[in-house]
Amino acid sequence: MKIGMLGLGTVGGGVAKILASPSGRSPLLSKVELVRVGVRDITKTRKVDLSPEILTSELEKIVTDPEIDLVVEVMGGLEPARTLILKAIEHGKHIVTANKSLIAAYGSEIFALARDRGVCIAFEAAVGGGIPIIQSLQQSLGANKLKAITGIVNGTTNYILSQMTEGGATFDDALQEAMQKGFAEANPTADIEGIDASEKLAILTLVAFGLEVDCKTIFRKGISSISQRDIAYAKAMNYTIKLLANVNLDEDGSLRLNVQPHLVENAHPLAAINGVFNAIFLEGEPVGQLMLYGQGAGEGATASAVVSDILNIVGSSAAWQVIHKNLPARASVSQESKSHFYLRLLTDKSATAAGAIAWSLGDFNVAPMSVQQQITKDGALEIAIITESVFRSTLDNAISSIRGLPYVKEVANVMPILKI
Amino acid sequence: MKIGMLGLGTVGGGVAKILASPSGRSPLLSKVELVRVGVRDITKTRKVDLSPEILTSELEKIVTDPEIDLVVEVMGGLEPARTLILKAIEHGKHIVTANKSLIAAYGSEIFALARDRGVCIAFEAAVGGGIPIIQSLQQSLGANKLKAITGIVNGTTNYILSQMTEGGATFDDALQEAMQKGFAEANPTADIEGIDASEKLAILTLVAFGLEVDCKTIFRKGISSISQRDIAYAKAMNYTIKLLANVNLDEDGSLRLNVQPHLVENAHPLAAINGVFNAIFLEGEPVGQLMLYGQGAGEGATASAVVSDILNIVGSSAAWQVIHKNLPARASVSQESKSHFYLRLLTDKSATAAGAIAWSLGDFNVAPMSVQQQITKDGALEIAIITESVFRSTLDNAISSIRGLPYVKEVANVMPILKI
């Protein structure tokens, strides 16, 4: 099988290295030959040793070349990646891509054309780096009715939260450190604000439930509001704060999606995922709970997924396509999800404040399960509350009411809780 | 695709239930029909609702029936399972089996015949229940050179160790509790002594490295020697005791296999795997560290794996076979593995005992990294030592020498250490 690759950056370089050193890997690698690599500048010095005649700056020629059987897209971005991939499919080529934003935005257009032309689309690298989550959802868990997927799918934010939790760093310091270590981009917004995680959640939802979701519609909250105060309360109550991407299939057939920081019970396997690692936790019937853990980014992990995708296409003569589950007819996307919640409030110092707030919450049928309070350095009263399980909308109404109480200065943070 | 199933116990019942309720699962289930189920007693009352004409006690007729495309073997045991599977392959049928002992003992005979006849053999359920480890090794990680696989692959022993660690139970009490809860068999020897884990390790080694290993030759030590004293020292030094099945590919091309309790550093993801759960941790180049976690046994998890195997064969027209890796030519099995070790010794009360023992270890180039000591209730001196990384044989020589020292009463336990 002859491969043409679009892009020779970090991931593309990693792919070329694996293809050039087949010993000890799958014997199917002997059937794979990299014949063309499209780059912007063919004169640039490269880390990988490729014969110069393989390189070309004419990307369009790769996707239309009749000699090429499979196109690997590792250039990133929406355009020209989308146009090139669609053209490659029209020319009957299988596609392997690591392009998360592209699949999240144009997945169903690409899959539909691929189905029509009978070619395979593989995109294991788009979510969780080298973690085999896409193939597991498409194949190994095919017997299951999936109920929920909850993932730590962004290594940058997990690194920052780990540093804040273990090292006591402030958010700003942890972000600076992540940037210095190359774990965060120069513009970290897509990571910090959960945009990257919401794209990955849209892909997981498409693969697991067959439902296309516009990631702009996913409820999304980033991690910049998390302070050492929240970390301290979470620790004291035996939780760890994690940015989670979550999709639940409710009994009424609604899918509930959100990306937001959660307090994760320490006994939950996701609480132990630290640093830049990713993990995807899921529940299915009858498999029960399952978690896959590994490096969510970087040259090696991503290249592992890309090359394994190539080998899967080589090894299988059947078309490899996204399997759409038999979703209940009423399936719809909803952002309302029922959960225990953590609230942190600042009030004037008052012996009755906690009681009055609990009373106000109770008026909205939000029952406090646990209340902790302490005096802050500047003399305010800080109250941390964990509620019984309620809908977010119910809680939001209760919070609006609390905000109106005369002694309440600030509702400093609100996060849902993940129990085991 | 028409399915004949051998056995209708817990797992077989679970498989029948999934096949009878396809809604919300993979659409490929619509292509699968269970046409025959072989049982010992067709008059027995069953939990699953199957039309009576499907049941037969003539198992041989199932494996030779020209109408049947795929045989599911969930009867367990070596015979008649082996003979029936070989006959089914000779009659051109694909095989899905959950039979770990059979694959560990006769895997290569079965795979060779299957390759010869061009049929698929799938056995995801044989290791780690519903955890998609076999498919990941065969497919999703094909790009990698695997370096090591380390698994908690026996739920019974992990439950017992968890109860000893969290609840302070003795080994005997924890074992009794596991038996009462149905987590341990009436005869728990195969679990407790690591025999079950060594069969699973042989299968993982075959799939990951293409090397057939007689599981009787794997270095194996069970958990019955572990006392609350060992648990206490492990906790104090920030480790958790786990029964690990481990295979390492050394740089000299040797595979080192062992099943034995380890002290696992608490920061290692395997340290957090509690109760009856299983987890398989692996390291590959370039994917890095990866871990898969889930329920390692039980009707649901095992049936999930069996049915997903069926669907994978249905979905792929290519023969699905064990992929043998390009092992270095010198590949051989060795039990020698280099590691940090934990030793617990009992000596006569003496201010110089710890020093003298450290000196003796040093004579054999075993350097103590950490030493803790305390007086036991009956007045002996107990010394817990963590050594620098050494070969087991080096350590064994040092221990023999220590045993000869006049004040040493007992070398109470020796376990390797897993660091992150």
Image (cartoon, coloured by chain):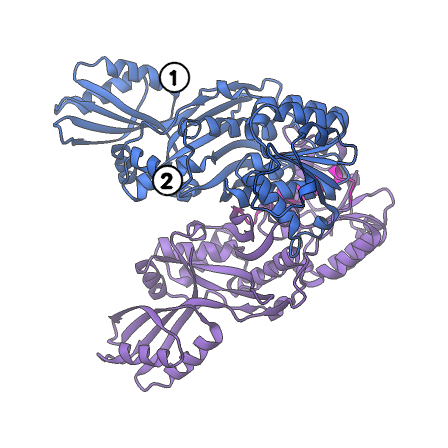
Chain colours: A blue, B purple
Q: Give the range drawn in magenta.
A: B292-318
x 48%, y 35%: residue:
A153
Which chain does the residue under circle 1 lie in? A
Label 2 sits on what residue type? Answer: Gln
SS class of the residue under badge 1? helix
x 26%, y 35%: residue:
A228
Q: What is the quadrant of the N terminus of chain B in the image?
A: top right
Quick check: A64 left or right of A139? right
x 34%, y 85%: residue:
B405
Image quarter of residue B330: bottom right
Label 1 sits on what residue type? Answer: Ser
Which chain does the residue under circle 2 lie in? A
Mark 2 in CB contact with mark 1 (< 8 angstroms): no
Mark 2 = which residue?
A180
Estimate the x, y position of residue A169 in percent, counting from the top left. 28, 39
Residue found at the far front of this picture: A43
Give the spatial CA distance, label 2 vs label 1.
Answer: 39 Å
In the rendered image of this protein, does residue B359 appear above or below residue A410?
A: below
Same subunit, labels 2 and 1: the answer reads: yes
B41 and B376: which one is in front? B376
SS class of the residue under badge 2? helix
Mark 1 = which residue?
A393
In the rendered image of this protein, does residue A115 appear above or below residue B272?
A: above
x 21%, y 78%: residue:
B351
Judge the density around disc 2: few (<14), some (14-19), many (≥20) Cα neighbours within 10 Å: few
| Residue A89 in view, yes or no | yes
Among numbered discs 2 and 1, the one appearing first in the sequence = 2
